[in-house]
């Protein structure tokens, strides 16, 4: 892996695989990379069925037509052994696989609670070192993944559909706050205008800020709204809000990497085995276990 030519897509793919699998020396190799933190990372999130893959495909076509090199990291929230529908959605991008300016990689969460793999940050940085002009991360909006993507992406796009109208009032405030751009996809469906109006009303109730998230109507299957979305992304990337929060984003990434490194030797099933023995022996105090026993519990780190 040392000395790998990351501009060669095959070598890039092999390097990512080694980092994914925690190959010996991979962490040291990552520390030696020359990273360009000015390469924009665009996060696309939203519920299943919102048409994110089709939207990403449209953005990909838009950027490629401008002569840009683009990497797409598609995070699959299912089991790495599950050939589910999300991986099947990559078929929509099949026309770009032979393009030397495009790199597409699917990544399983491998049990990550929030829907993003612990390796997402590392792989994103490898893509930065490979010299792409744009990096797009697509993830399904499950659990905390919408919040997590905001800690990785410079610009976060939340994709919704008109049918979400009944749920929009119940959305977590955090999700509404992390979205830099809202896309109402499948905007040719009934109820689209009412849904956009409801969304706009909710957004205007937020405290005033330097960046007001735009609401973009799109029909990704017809390539409608893609150019408008690309323009909105560029506007946000140039905004003062993006520049001012770069340090926060890097701090968030550092926190997640430290957390991942500290927890890598801890296996839940071993913790459960030890707790079961303690329960069989009588009284068990969870907080005492975490505070005292867990730190020096050798079976957990075997």
Image: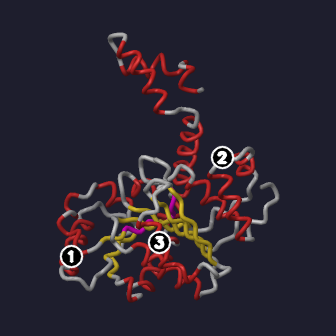
Q: Check the picture and name the quadrant holding the C terminus.
A: top right
Query: Which residue is tagged 3?
Result: 236
Asked whether, in this view, residue 157 is left or right of residue 30, the answer is: left
Estimate how packed mark 3 is, as few (under 14), some (14 to 19) or many (20 or more) residues with alpha carbons within 10 Å.
many
Q: Which element is circle 1 on?
A: helix
Q: Which element is circle 2 on?
A: loop
Q: Residue at x 38, y 64 (%)?
A: 179
| Marker disc for residue 22 | 2
| Marker disc for residue 69 | none
Q: Check the picture and name the quadrant holding the N terminus.
A: bottom right
Q: Which residue is drawn at 44% across and 24% down?
A: 273
Q: Does residue 170 show up magenta in the picture?
A: no
| Residue 226, placed above or below residue 198 | below
Q: What stretch is highlighted in magenta?
A: 152-158
Asked whether, in this view, residue 283 is left or right of residue 19, the answer is: left
Q: Nearer the viewer, residue 1 or 124?
A: 1
Compute the Cα span from label 2 to label 3: 35 Å
Query: Which residue is tagged 1?
Result: 197
Q: Which element is circle 3 on?
A: helix
Lower position in the chain sequence, tag 1 or tag 3: 1
Asked whether, in this view, residue 45 is left or right of residue 264, the answer is: left
Q: Position of residue 164 (x, y in %)?
A: 23, 68
């Amino acid at each position: 892996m040392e000395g790998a030519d990351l501009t060669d897509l095959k070598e890039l793919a092999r390097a990512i695989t080694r980092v994914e699998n925690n190959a010996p020396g991979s962490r040291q190799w990552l520390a030696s990379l020359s990273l360009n933190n000015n390469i924009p990372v665009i996060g696309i999130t939203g519920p299943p069925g919102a048409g994110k893959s089709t939207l990403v495909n449209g953005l990909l076509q838009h950027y490629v037509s401008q002569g840009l090199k683009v990497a797409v990291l598609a995070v699959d929230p299912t089991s790495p052994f599950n050939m589910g529908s999300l991986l099947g959605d990559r078929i929509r991008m099949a026309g770009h696989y032979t393009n030397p300016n495009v790199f597409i990689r699917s990544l399983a969460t491998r049990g990550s609670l929030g829907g993003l793999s612990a390796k997402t940050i590392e792989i994103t940085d490898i893509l930065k070192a490979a010299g792409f002009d744009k990096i797009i991360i697509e993830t399904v909006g499950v659990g905390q993944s919408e919040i997590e993507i905001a800690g990785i992406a410079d610009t976060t796009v939340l994709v919704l559909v008109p049918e979400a109208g009944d749920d929009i009032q119940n959305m977590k405030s955090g999700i509404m706050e992390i979205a830099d751009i809202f896309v109402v996809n499948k905007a040719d469906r009934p109820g689209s205008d009412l849904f956009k109006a409801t969304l706009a009303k909710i957004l205007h109730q937020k405290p005033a800020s330097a960046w007001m998230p735009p609401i973009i109507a799109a029909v990704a299957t017809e390539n409608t709204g893609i150019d408008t979305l690309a323009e909105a992304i560029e506007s946000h990337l140039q905004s003062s809000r993006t520049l001012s929060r770069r340090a926060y984003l890097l701090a968030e990434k550092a926190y997640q990497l430290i957390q991942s490194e500290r927890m890598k030797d801890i296996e839940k099933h071993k913790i459960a085995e030890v707790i079961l023995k303690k329960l069989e022996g009588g009284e068990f105090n969870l907080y005492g276990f975490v505070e005292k026993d867990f730190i020096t519990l050798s079976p957990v780190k075997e």
